Amino acid sequence: MTRRDRAASPWIPRVAAGRLSRYLRYLEELEARGEATTSSKQLGDALGVTAAQVRKDLGYFGQFGFPGLGYKISQLIPDIRRILGMERTWSVALVGIGNLGNALGRYKGFHAHGFRLSALFDANPRIVGRSVEGLKVHGTDQLERVIRDKGIELAIIAVPAAAAQAVAEQLVRAGIRGIYNFAPVRLSLPPEVAYVSIDLAVELEQLAFLVSQRDRDGLEGQDSGA
């Protein structure tokens, strides 16, 4: 995944901040199972990193855990949620209600993690005026007004690559502070706007690489044992 978050503190590695969400998901699983505490080793084993790496990642943000007890799950979950900015609900605009955008508009997991889709936009007049999960699709010509009126701060771009930069510039003019970009193109944005991008084709290439690498490792292991 290609990520660029210029809002992150420069002394905190982006990869370390990114692992916090994975720690949080696992902690929530443990809490749902009735567990009260966990350890850096347990967290590391679950996420495929070392216990030392877990302690280092958390150490960027403060002192957590208790000697001999590990981490109290009921305390660490809200601490990580606070670090991630999830102590509040974020309003999100979604631009592009094609196949991908329509699926994102119907995704139920946003609200559970502190995000509320508050406005939908599309340039296609055949889509404008439709409703997705109770939200009306506005034309992109209304984007700036609606976003300002609703005080929306985050946006998801799910439009074709050729339209992505123009949409991003509209969002910036509307006051959007963070953009999640699904379009397979690099955006040019002012430094005060946080920007995360994902290219699904690149993700599949990485997956193919990992599978191919395991195949090669397996063949090398067979050769060495011959």
Image (tube, grey):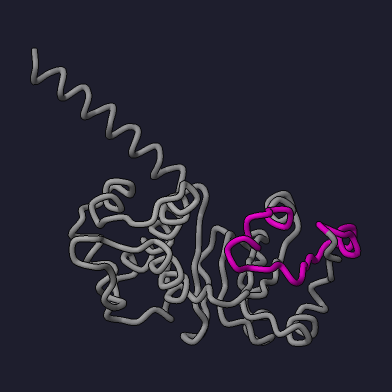
Q: Quadrant of the N terminus?
A: bottom left
The x and y percentages for residue 62 are 29, 78
Question: In this view of the protein, which residue sits in the foreground, 57 or 182?
Answer: 57
Residue 126 appears left or right of 6: right
State the residue at coordinates (57%, 65%).
181
State the residue at coordinates (49%, 87%).
192
Question: In this view of the protein, which residue sits in the foreground, 198 or 84?
Answer: 84
The x and y percentages for residue 164 are 63, 67
The x and y percentages for residue 22 are 41, 56
Q: Is residue 124 visible?
A: yes
State the residue at coordinates (26%, 56%).
39
Q: Is residue 166 visible?
A: no
Please tell me whether residue 145 belongs to the stretch shown in magenta: no
Q: Is residue 200 positioned above or below 177 on the image?
A: above
Image quadrant in which you'd find residue 151: bottom right
> Start and end of the magenta stretch?
104-133
In this view, which residue lies farthest toward the top? 226
